[in-house]
Amino acid sequence: PARTLELSSRGGAVVVTGGARQTLEQGDVLLTVDGESVLSAGQARGMLRDPPDTVRQLTLRRSGKVKTVRWRTPSLQ
Protein backbone atom coordinates (compact mmCIF):
# COMPACT_ATOMS: atom_id res chain seq x y z
CA PRO A 1 0.00 0.00 0.00
CA ALA A 2 1.02 3.61 -0.52
CA ARG A 3 2.70 5.40 2.34
CA THR A 4 0.71 8.19 3.93
CA LEU A 5 1.92 11.66 3.04
CA GLU A 6 2.43 13.67 6.23
CA LEU A 7 1.76 17.41 6.06
CA SER A 8 1.71 20.07 8.75
CA SER A 9 1.00 23.77 8.96
CA ARG A 10 4.03 25.81 10.01
CA GLY A 11 4.01 29.58 10.14
CA GLY A 12 1.17 29.87 7.64
CA ALA A 13 2.73 27.37 5.22
CA VAL A 14 1.92 23.72 4.50
CA VAL A 15 5.07 21.62 4.77
CA VAL A 16 5.78 17.98 3.82
CA THR A 17 6.96 16.45 7.12
CA GLY A 18 7.09 12.75 6.26
CA GLY A 19 6.02 9.92 4.02
CA ALA A 20 7.26 11.81 0.97
CA ARG A 21 7.15 9.84 -2.25
CA GLN A 22 7.15 10.39 -5.98
CA THR A 23 8.23 13.97 -6.61
CA LEU A 24 7.74 15.37 -3.11
CA GLU A 25 10.50 15.62 -0.53
CA GLN A 26 10.43 16.21 3.20
CA GLY A 27 10.63 19.96 3.80
CA ASP A 28 8.85 20.95 0.58
CA VAL A 29 6.38 23.82 1.08
CA LEU A 30 3.17 23.16 -0.84
CA LEU A 31 1.82 26.33 -2.50
CA THR A 32 -0.92 25.17 -4.90
CA VAL A 33 -2.72 22.04 -6.09
CA ASP A 34 -4.08 22.32 -9.63
CA GLY A 35 -3.72 26.11 -9.37
CA GLU A 36 -5.74 26.36 -6.14
CA SER A 37 -3.92 27.90 -3.17
CA VAL A 38 -3.29 25.56 -0.27
CA LEU A 39 -4.45 27.16 2.98
CA SER A 40 -4.08 24.33 5.51
CA ALA A 41 -2.58 20.87 5.95
CA GLY A 42 -6.07 19.35 6.21
CA GLN A 43 -7.18 20.93 2.95
CA ALA A 44 -4.00 19.73 1.22
CA ARG A 45 -4.45 16.15 2.49
CA GLY A 46 -7.95 16.08 1.02
CA MET A 47 -6.80 17.50 -2.31
CA LEU A 48 -3.98 14.95 -2.60
CA ARG A 49 -6.05 11.94 -1.57
CA ASP A 50 -9.24 12.04 -3.63
CA PRO A 51 -10.02 10.64 -6.10
CA PRO A 52 -7.40 7.86 -6.26
CA ASP A 53 -5.08 7.62 -9.29
CA THR A 54 -5.65 11.24 -10.35
CA VAL A 55 -2.69 13.28 -11.61
CA ARG A 56 -2.43 16.66 -9.90
CA GLN A 57 -0.18 19.60 -10.71
CA LEU A 58 1.56 20.92 -7.59
CA THR A 59 3.49 24.13 -7.14
CA LEU A 60 5.96 23.96 -4.29
CA ARG A 61 8.94 25.73 -2.82
CA ARG A 62 12.08 23.66 -2.27
CA SER A 63 15.36 25.17 -1.08
CA GLY A 64 14.08 28.67 -1.87
CA LYS A 65 13.10 27.83 -5.46
CA VAL A 66 9.55 27.49 -6.79
CA LYS A 67 8.90 24.48 -9.00
CA THR A 68 5.93 22.68 -10.52
CA VAL A 69 5.64 18.89 -10.33
CA ARG A 70 3.10 16.22 -11.21
CA TRP A 71 1.66 14.03 -8.43
CA ARG A 72 -0.50 10.93 -8.73
CA THR A 73 -2.93 10.47 -5.84
CA PRO A 74 -2.47 7.10 -4.08
CA SER A 75 -4.53 4.19 -5.39
CA LEU A 76 -6.88 2.27 -3.12
CA GLN A 77 -5.06 -1.07 -3.70
Image: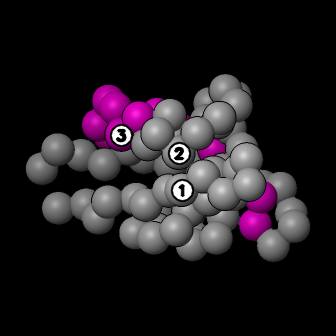
The residues bearing labels 1 and 3 have C-alpha atoms spaced at a distance of 15 Å
Q: Which residue is mark 1?
A: 8
The structure residue drawn at horizontal position 53% and vertical position 45%, both measured from the top left corner, is 41
Q: Is there CB contact under 8 Å for labels 1 and 2?
A: yes
Magenta residues, start to end: 46-62
The residues bearing labels 1 and 2 have C-alpha atoms spaced at a distance of 5 Å
Res 49 visible: yes
Residue 14 % position (x, y): 63, 51
Between disc 3 and disc 2, the foreground one is: 2
Q: How is the image coloured?
A: one colour
Residue 38 % position (x, y): 64, 36
Q: Earlier in the sequence, mark 1 or mark 2?
A: 1
- Nearest the camera: 15 or 22? 15
Res 23 visible: no
Q: Is residue 71 left or right of residue 11?
A: left
* Label ID, residue 77: none
Secondary structure of residue under mark 2: helix
Q: Which residue is mark 2?
A: 41
Residue 74 falls inside the magenta stretch: no
